[in-house]
Image (cartoon, rainbow, N blue to C red):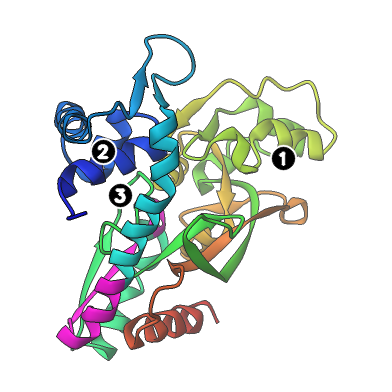
């Protein structure tokens, strides 16, 4: 059979993975209506239904038996296409290195060091992708990235870059307003980093207080921000006390914009920073050099 309706196949494959036209649209950078139309055209051409549309329940899309049968091979087909493109890229000798990082990691760690890489490897055109959403390395042309988590992501290889500890930080001005013991923290505004989901394992203020045998503090009060760099900036501004992530607050501690409270009460976390790249993809010279440069910066 000839390959027809490639756009429809892409729309179907993405929708089937997410069980959502809206999430598939975000991945492919089109509208949900366009995804629905492409899937409809594919269904008409095949003469079958691929999804059962439901208006209630956890998911609005349910794969039909025919869709479940064909989906694994279609997914593998797109993976093979991506691998084939990887084989062609070295032939083009592309000077572009695309690196995916979170906005907070870019702002608080990478950008202040990246000039060294650009000076050392000026022949490469470095591009930083700082999307808040999780990017798809296969479909979005990402060469390498840095992710924060437990080191396991579907479709990606991962190499440990940095571990991290968590501890309270605040501005020197706020410190002088009467933070003397661990219990006194509860008298000041708490800053909450909600950029990571609760199930990620990142310690919350509630967890931190309980680890230090303090159980009568209202840990729900305070400013909640979904960007780690903005949480740090709020602490620098004197707006409250934050649970500082050691990697992200290091430079602010070194230059005195922040101070660490109770240095002997650091909390370890199973989350860490990893260098990641496409699973089964070609580890090009660019990726190898960038990985080596990152480790040199950590050392």
Q: Marks 2 and 1, how far apart in space?
A: 48 Å
Q: Above or below — where is 251 with respect to 223? A: below
**Magenta segment boundaries in residue numbering:** 84-105
Spot occupied by residue 236 in the image (x, y as percentages of width and height) = 44, 46
Residue hosting label 2: 26
Callout 1 touching callout 3 (CB < 8 Å): no
Q: Above or below — where is 37 with respect to 157? A: above
- Secondary structure, mark 3, is loop
Which residue corresponds to the image point at 60% horizontal and 21% vertical from the top-left?
220
Callout 2 touching callout 1 (CB < 8 Å): no
Depth-wise, is mark 2 or mark 1 nearer the camera?
2
Depth-wise, is mark 1 or mark 3 nearer the camera?
3
User: Residue 70 vs residue 212: left or right?
Assistant: left
On the image, which quarter does residue 121 sit in?
bottom left
User: Pointer 3: residues within 10 angstroms few (<14), some, or many (20+)?
Assistant: few
Name of the residue lying farthest toward the top = 56
Residue hosting label 3: 131
Q: Above or below — where is 215 with respect to 125? A: above
Q: Marks 1 and 3, how far apart in space?
A: 40 Å
Which residue corresponds to the image point at 52% horizontal and 63% vertical from the top-left?
250
| Residue 197 highlighted magenta (yes or no) | no
Quadrant in the picture for the C terminus = bottom right
Q: Marks 2 and 3, how far apart in space?
A: 12 Å
- Is residue 287 among the parts visible in the rendering? yes
Spot occupied by residue 234 in the image (x, y as percentages of width and height) = 42, 39
- Is residue 230 among the parts visible in the rendering? no
Q: Which mark is residue 180?
A: 1
User: Residue 42 vs residue 236: left or right?
Assistant: left
Depth-wise, is mark 2 or mark 3 nearer the camera?
2
Name of the residue lying farthest toward the front = 1
């Amino acid at each position: 059979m000839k390959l027809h309706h490639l756009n429809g196949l892409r729309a179907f494959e993405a929708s089937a993975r997410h069980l959502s036209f809206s999430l598939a649209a975000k991945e492919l950078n089109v509208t949900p209506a366009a995804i629905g139309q492409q899937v409809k055209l594919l269904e008409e051409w095949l003469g079958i239904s691929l999804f059962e549309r439901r208006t209630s329940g956890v998911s609005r899309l349910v794969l039909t038996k025919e869709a479940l049968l064909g989906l694994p091979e279609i997914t593998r087909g797109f993976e093979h296409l991506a691998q084939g493109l990887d084989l062609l890229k070295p032939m083009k000798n592309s000077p572009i290195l695309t690196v995916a990082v979170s906005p907070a990691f870019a702002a608080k760690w990478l950008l202040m060091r990246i000039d060294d890489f650009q000076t050392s490897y000026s022949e490469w055109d470095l591009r930083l992708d700082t999307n808040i959403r999780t990017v798809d390395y296969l479909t979005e042309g990402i060469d390498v990235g840095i992710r924060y988590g437990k080191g396991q992501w579907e479709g990606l290889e991962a190499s440990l870059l940095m571990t991290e500890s968590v501890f309270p930080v605040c501005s020197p001005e706020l410190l002088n307003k009467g933070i003397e013991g661990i219990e006194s923290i509860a008298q000041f505004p708490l800053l909450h980093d909600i950029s990571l989901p609760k199930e990620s394992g990142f310690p919350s203020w509630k967890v931190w207080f309980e680890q230090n045998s303090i159980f009568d503090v209202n840990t729900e009060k305070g400013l909640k921000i979904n960007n780690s760099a903005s949480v740090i900036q709020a602490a620098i501004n004197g707006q409250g006390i934050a649970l500082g992530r050691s990697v992200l607050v290091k430079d602010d501690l070194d230059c005195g914009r922040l101070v660490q409270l109770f240095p002997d009460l650091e909390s370890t976390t199973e989350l860490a920073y990893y260098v990641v790249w496409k699973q089964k993809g070609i580890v090009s010279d660019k990726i190898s050099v960038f990985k080596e440069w990152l480790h040199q910066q950590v050392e």
